Amino acid sequence: MNENPSDVPSPPGANALSSLVISLLKGVLYLENDAPLWNALIQLQARVRDHIAVLGLELVLDEAEGYAFLRARPEIEAEDGNPTDKLPRLIARRPLSFPVSLLLALLRKKLAEFDASGEQTRLILARDEIVELLRLFLPESSNEARLIDQIDTHINKIVDLGFLRRLKPAAGSSAAGGGNFEVRRILKAFVDAQWLAEFDDRLGEYRAALAGETAASHSDMNKA
C-alpha cells in the first residue's frame, strides 16, 4: 500500500539546523507546539548533537513524550583541574526553594499514579487540588488567604520553570478558584524513577526540615 504523501515529513529547509539550535538554546521544544520543527529535529538530531557538543551541551530527546531540551554534559559538570580550561556554564542552574522542590516531588508522584491508572494521557489538576497537595506539609497558619497566596507563588514559579501549564478557562466558565493546570510530562526527565522510588525517604527529610524550620520560628517568636 502506498504511503499518503501528506504523512511523510518534508525535508528540513536550508536554515533548519540553525532554527533548531536557536530554539533549543531558548528553551524546551515540544511536538505539540511546533510539529514541523519537531520533525526537523528527528531528522537532524545527529547534526544537532554534534553542533551543541562543542558548547559542552547534550540533547535530551524523548520521542514518546514529545519533548526535547539541552543540558550541560555530565562530564563537563564534574570536570576538575585547571580553572582556565573549564568551560563556563551556558545554561544557568536554578536553585529551588524548599516548598517548590517539595511541590515538584508531589506532582511527580501524582504523575506516576496517573500513568499507572492508564486512563488518559494528560494529567490536569485544579489549583485547589495542588493547594491541598502542598498544604499538608506547610506550617499551620491562621491566615488562610496568605497561605493560598504563598502556594500560588510556588505554583507560578513551577509554571515559569515549565513543569506546569496554566490552561485557559473553557468557554462560558470563569477562572474562579484559580483555574486548571496541566502537569507537563517533561517533569519525568528531572525527577526520575529511581528518585521517585526514594520518595518516602525524601518526604521524611522534608518533614524533618519543616519541623526544624517551625521550631526555629517558634524559638524566634518566644525571644521576641
Image (tube, rainbow, N blue to C red):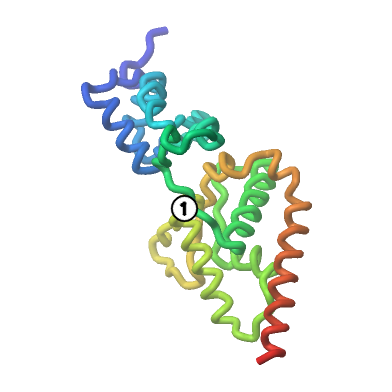
Image height check: is 37 above or below 115? above
Identify the image quadrant of the C terminus: bottom right
The image quarter in which residue 32 lies: top left
Residue closest to the far bottom: 224
Image height check: is 102 above or below 175? above
In the shown orientation, is residue 124 left or right of residue 102?
left
Q: Is residue 69 visible?
A: no
In the shown orientation, is residue 43 left or right of residue 147?
left
Frontmost residue, 179 versus 185: 185
Which residue appears at 30% of the width and 36% of the height?
22
Frontmost residue, 88 versus 60: 88
Q: How many marks?
A: 1
Residue closest to the far left: 14
Give how far across and how far down residue 169 sits, in percent: 42, 62
Q: Residues within 10 Å of mark 1 (few under 14, many from 20)?
A: few
In the shown orientation, is residue 1 left or right of residue 105?
left
Frontmost residue, 23 versus 4: 23
Give how far across and how far down residue 198 sits, in percent: 75, 46
In the shown orientation, is residue 38 left or right of residue 112?
left
Q: Is residue 212 visible?
A: yes
Residue closest to the far top: 1
Which residue appears at 34% of the width and 43% of the height?
26
Which residue appears at 69% of the width and 72% of the height?
213
- Which element carries disc 1, helix, strand or loop? helix
Which residue appears at 56% of the width and 62% of the height?
97
Dot 1 corresponds to which residue?
A: 161
Give how far across and how far down residue 209 sits, in percent: 71, 65
Identify the image quadrant of the N terminus: top left
Give how far across and how far down residue 9 sits, in percent: 34, 21
Which amino acid lies under the numbered mark 1 shown in the image of this protein? Leu
